[in-house]
Amino acid sequence: MHTHERLDDKQLREYPPLALAFIGDAVLELAVRTRLVTGARRKMKDLHLETVGVVKAENQARLVRDIMGELSVAEQDIIRWGRNAHSTPPRNANPADYSLSNGFETLLGYLYLKGDEERLLSLVEQALRQAECSNHD
């Protein structure tokens, strides 16, 4: 579902990383909500709580730590670029986790705007699988 012209690497590097993270956050949240709504029936309250459980900074940071070695050098660079962008974490978030989750969301936004849906979906699937595993522990 692309509602924009696909951007190349040079164009994408002109955006602030937090703008890309803003898009990446929405992409991840939409993917999680879609998975939950199209899966087993749940109450609205449960949909919200499960969505928050997947998209929270702590879980995103854990995923990035787990998969960093599997990412390309370019993807690692994008995560570092987003991680190092200045932002103020919410009071309930660990600053290191929040920064790393910004990096992950920057990568997701980058891939979305670039039009690399295959890689984007692969990373979103990994986030969903990890969240499902951690919910069963």
Image (cartoon, rainbow, N blue to C red):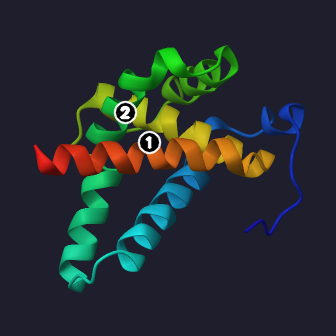
Q: Which mark is residue 63?
A: 2
Q: Residues within 10 Å of mark 1 (few under 14, many from 20)?
A: few
Where residue 45 appears, as percent x and y from the top left, is: 19, 80
Q: Position of residue 16 (x, y in %)?
A: 68, 38
What residue is shown at x 53% (from left), y 41% (from top)? 123
Can you tell which quarter of the image residue 17 is in?
top right
Kindly identify the residue that appears in the image at 47 percent across and 37 percent down.
102
Tell me what residue is drawn at x 47 percent, y 49 percent: 125
Q: Quarter of the image for the C terminus: give it.
A: top left
Q: Nearer the viewer, residue 15 or 26?
A: 26
In the figure, is residue 35 to the left or right of 26? left
Q: Which mark is residue 126?
A: 1
SS at badge 1: helix
126 above or below 23? above
Task: State which quadrant residue 127 falls in.
Answer: top left
Which residue occupies 79% across, 50% down? Answer: 115
Tell whether label 1 touches label 2 (CB within 8 Å). Answer: yes
Q: Secondary structure at mark 2?
A: helix
Which mark's residue is nearer the viewer, 2 or 1? 1
Left or right, 36 with reference to 77: left
Query: Where's residue 88, x and y in %?
Result: 38, 39
Instruction: Tell me: 99 left or right of 24.
Output: left
Crowd around label 2: few <14 · some 14–19 · many ≥20 (10 Å): many
Amino acid at pointer 1: Gln
